[in-house]
Image (cartoon, helix red, strand yellow):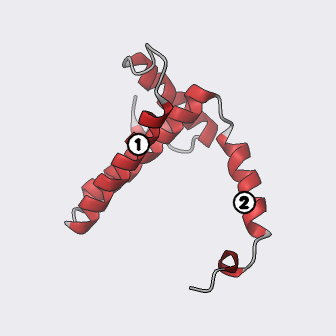
Amino acid sequence: MQATELKGKTLSEYCDICHGIAKEKGFWDEERNIGEALMLVVTELAEAMEGYRKQDHDNFREEIADAYIRLFDLCGGLKIDIEEEIAQKCIKNKGRPYKHGKIC
């Protein structure tokens, strides 16, 4: 698999790809602990923060990608139509007040 083959995919396609790789590597052999899977996303974001703090731009970008990959895998495993969820949430957010009504 080459990066050029993966560019331009839809979010749903990335969910299928990332979940397929995770299954292939054994991460779904047993029922997933969803709390643990979510915290792994948080861990990737913490690692991105560390890369940002150290001004390690390559590591920062890689860890951001890891966070997306973990989310796409989770969506694929749980059969979440993330494209639909994002579309619905954008509509909801568009109807909210400026800064969601917060003063600060």
- Above or below residue 45? Residue 66 is above
Q: Residue furthest bottom?
A: 103
Residue 10 seen anywhere in this rendered image of the structure = no
Question: Quadrant where the N terminus lies?
Answer: top left
Question: Quadrant where the C terminus lies?
Answer: bottom right
At horizontal 56% and vertical 26% (from top left) the residue drawn is: 77
At horizontal 68% and vertical 75% (from top left) the residue drawn is: 100
Check disc 2 and report the residue beneath it: 90
Check disc 1 and report the residue beneath it: 39
> Measured from the top left, where is residue 59 in percent x and y?
26, 54
Foreground residue, 2 or 93?
93
Packing grade of label 1 (10 A; few <14, some 14-19, many >=20) is few
Looking at marks 2 and 1 on the same chain, the residue that comes earlier in the sequence is marked by: 1
> Measured from the top left, where is residue 20 in percent x and y?
49, 23
Foreground residue, 53 or 65?
53
Residue 81 seen anywhere in this rendered image of the structure = yes
Q: Secondary structure at mark 2?
A: helix
Q: Is residue 97 left or right of residue 68?
A: right
Q: Is residue 91 left or right of residue 28?
A: right
Q: Nearer the viewer, mark 2 or mark 1?
A: 1
- Above or below residue 63? Residue 71 is above
> Measured from the top left, where is residue 85 in percent x and y?
70, 46
Residue type, mark 1 in image: Met
Q: Secondary structure at mark 1?
A: helix
